[in-house]
Amino acid sequence: MYLERLNRLTQQMTKHAIANVLITDPSSISYFLPYHTHPGERLFVLHVTQAGPHRLYLNQLFPVAVLPPELQACVAITTYKDGEAVLETISRHLLPGKTAIDKFWSSHFLLDLMTIQPSLQPINHSLVDDLRAIKSPEEQTLMRQASHLNDQAMQALIDLVPQRLSEQQMVDALKQIYQRLGADGGFSFEPIVAYGANGADPHHETSNDVVQVGEAIVLDIGCVHQGYCSDMTRTVFYGTPDSESLHVYDLVRRANEAAIQCVRPGVTIADIDRAARQIIEEAGYGDYFTHRTGHFIGREVHEAGDVSSFNQATAQVGQIFSIEPGIYLPGRIGVRIEDLVLVTEDGCEVLNHVSKAPLMIEAE
């Protein structure tokens, strides 16, 4: 698996005449090698060339990288101590030509490398992101499993609503729910539990507020399982909401379903965004749909690529992204409904299965 991924990367490097790729994002390094660490401020680099050998640079403070035999034959590991001139070592192994630089690499490392090697030809290229965006059958299975756990967690969280726990208590309970279900990586992002007007902030930070009768509850949650992320949002009501709240909910649900119906290979991502946005705009709520329709997801909850009006790329088989339209009326209500979809040969597979029918939970 790992060797195949490296080979696909080197093939793309040859196609685009790129001599070197410097990968520094730990999630991307672990995509190509069975090794993961969080290096903090220290340099951590996988240097890939078209013909190899590839080189992993790792501070000796971190666990030793033990690679399987097939990778040992093509990946050399260089450990260094604090204070050693490791960039000098990297520079000596760089081949002439274009060098694709990881978008997350700290600028001081790049600037220092450019000082050491003034002839460096750094470019920002999406080779690694493009490879990661197409999920293999094995990755697709892991994403289904993570989403299945998230479905169960969402239902368990909804079942707690009658207890009128505070937003923070709901988040605390969710952590225990994931542990009980066997999600081995914890939260994939900080959960959002937003009652009433708090839901009008798409990125609401958890408070100690308690839900009131008639309010909407936005539940945006996700877990990590076996290295892959889930993400889903449902909006439910505590008691009977007013008529506009139900109307807003219906619009968002229709927008979510319209965008999902639009997903298939060859359709532009912008058209998927448009399918959702048009329904909300035509109803007069366009100014209150304030974010993109979705984001790509996999080993990280937000990966390169988004479902927005600016993305003219076409959907490809194996991509997984969210469909999450929303309407946010300041001081009143927020509604968001989110599913993950996997692009298939003839359309898409929705990875989430918690009902999207309006749910009014009886107030006790």
Image (cartoon, grey):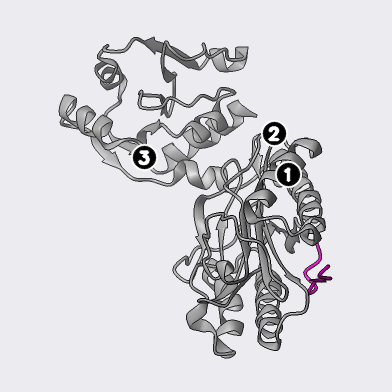
Considering the numbered disc 1 on the image, is that residue within a helix, a strand or a loop? helix
The prevailing secondary structure element of the residues shown in magenta is: loop
Considering the numbered disc 2 on the image, is that residue within a helix, a strand or a loop? loop
In which image quadrant can residue 235 be found?
Answer: bottom right
Q: Earlier in the sequence, mark 1 or mark 3?
A: 3
Asked if the residue at tag 3 contacts the one at tag 1, i.e. Cβ–Cβ closer than 8 Å, the answer is no
Q: Which mark is residue 164?
A: none
Residue 148 x %, y %? 79, 48
- The residue pinned by badge 1 equals 146
Q: Nearer the viewer, residue 229 or 195?
A: 195
- The residue pinned by badge 3 equals 17
- Which callout, 1 or 3, points to the residue nearer the camera? 1
Which kind of residue does numbered mark 3 sit on? Ala
Residue 72 x %, y %? 55, 13
What is the CA distance from the residue labelled 1 to the residue labelled 3? 37 Å
Residue 254 x %, y %? 70, 79
Q: Earlier in the sequence, mark 3 or mark 2?
A: 3
* Residue name at image x 40 percent, y 24 percent: 44
Q: Is residue 49 above or below residue 188?
A: above
| Residue extent of the magenta highlight | 354-364
Within-10-Å neighbours for mark 2: few <14, some 14–19, many 20+: some
- The residue pinned by badge 2 equals 226
Within-10-Å neighbours for mark 1: few <14, some 14–19, many 20+: many
Answer left or right for 357 relative to 30: right
Asked if the residue at tag 1 contacts the one at tag 2, i.e. Cβ–Cβ closer than 8 Å, the answer is yes
What is the CA distance from the residue labelled 3 to the residue labelled 2? 35 Å
What is the CA distance from the residue labelled 2 to the residue labelled 1? 8 Å
* Residue name at image x 54 percent, y 43 percent: 131
Q: Is residue 356 above or below residue 99?
A: below
